[in-house]
Amino acid sequence: MSLFDKYAPLQSRVDMMMKIGKDALGVQFDDILSATKGRVGNREILLAGTNNYLGLTFDEDCMAAAKDAVTRHGTGTTGSRVANGSYHEHIDLENALAEHLGMPSCVVFTTGYQTNLAAIAGLAGDKDIIFMDADAHACIIDGTRLTGASTIRFRHNSPEDLDKRLRRQGEIEGGNALVVIEGMYSMFGDIAPVDEFVDVTHRHGGYLYIDEAHSYGVFGPTGCGIAEEQGVLDKIDFISGTFSKSLASVGGFCASKHPEFEITRKVMRPYMFTASATPSNICAARAAVEKVKTGAHLRQNLKDRAAQLHAGLAAMDYDLCAEPSPVIAVRRPNEAVAAMEWNALIESGVYVNLAVPPGTPQSSSLLRISLSAAHTEEDINQIIKAFGDLKTNQASMMQSMMTKMQAAE
């Protein structure tokens, strides 16, 4: 028996995808031309699946900050902040994020994934109980696995179900309840009723942890996320986010209204035992924070483009998973159809994400679109036309798919 035999079912799915067309989960871009344009071979592709929500990856100030950081400090830190110390830019970024969010404590991490891995594992102990939304991201799930805490899932976006489970649990002897939700969920683009979760959590004496990875920079008067949008930012116990979406870099952060959060730097293993973020990543994110704070015009264009696309797809009777947001997920009948249509879209010059189980809620097969403030009305019209062509050519595409799969057997 081979070490890899357990992956045989997965290999079969990959083989099926390759019979249909390209590897949708391993696309190689030969060049990235702008926040919304890339190149595959000799063809220009409209990027509609990059999570570049504010379009800042090509912002002149962000690029200049990254270049200057490399000139001054080199390309890497070569170790963790515990072992090699912090650059003053690490501290400056933490202070800037803490000030923006109105919280006394903020810790910066090397990736967004490590942020939730570290913070959740650092906060929850053996006697605590984590109450987690059923659609929580993989990094939240993995963070809970690093703890000795019990985990209870509640129905997605349901404060009522959380209330029932907290009430049923009652007082936690020697421990606390840590409730973990997201602001905007990454697959469907649906929004959490954070204000209601605040009420339920605190009424039961728990702590509320919200991951705003896909909503920081995008929502709220100053871009702090869904909690700010719903007027409860000052009531959130812990808020995490990533640099790889609106902040146009790589890294993550967790901020808290509790000054005692600082002590967790001494216990968070993904913080203590990994190399710290590079100077260029930190400085690009620092410049992007200023863009977020003054980016009301970016958020408005993003909102307008999301409404335009959502309306266009709804008019063609596509099954959309949520109300308009920067993430618009189109539900498809099955994985094979989704893969076929993904190939057709990229052939028409539009790149979106193919999202399939187990990484999707409700075992859905999705064509997932993430929009950018850098997208124009013309860009959205191009996406709408590409999806319109899918409807028109569906019968011929199905026949072509069947022919390809039979020829490959």
Image: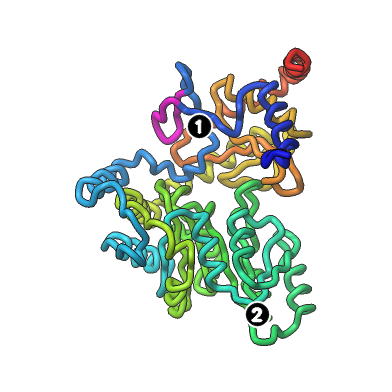
**Residue 89 — which label?**
none
Residue drawn where x is 43% and y is 52% of the image: 243
Scheme of colours in the image: rainbow
* Front residue of this view, candidates 196 and 246: 246
Point out the residue furthest to the front here. Answer: 1
Counting from the top left corner in percent of width and height, residue 154 is at: 74, 65
- Label 1 is placed on what type of residue? Leu
Which quadrant of the figure has residue 58? top left
Q: Residue at x 66, y 24 (%)?
A: 18
Image position of 38 (left or right of 203): left
Looking at the image, tell me whether mark 2 or mark 1 is earlier in sequence order.
1
**Secondary structure category for the residue under label 1:** strand
Range of the magenta residues? 30-39
Q: Is residue 105 left or right of residue 6?
A: left
Where is residue 15 drawn, in percent x and y?
A: 70, 27
Mark-to-mark CA distance, 2 and 1: 46 Å
Task: Please state which of residues 127 and 134 is positioned toward the viewer in this rendering.
Answer: 127
Residue 366 in the image, given as x and y percentages of width and height: 69, 38
From the image, tell me which residue sits under label 2. 127
Question: Can you see residue 378?
Answer: no
Q: Which residue is mark 1?
A: 47
32 within the magenta span: yes
Q: Is residue 104 visible?
A: yes
Measured from the top left, where is residue 139 in percent x and y?
A: 58, 56
The reply to whether the magenta stretch includes residue 345 is: no
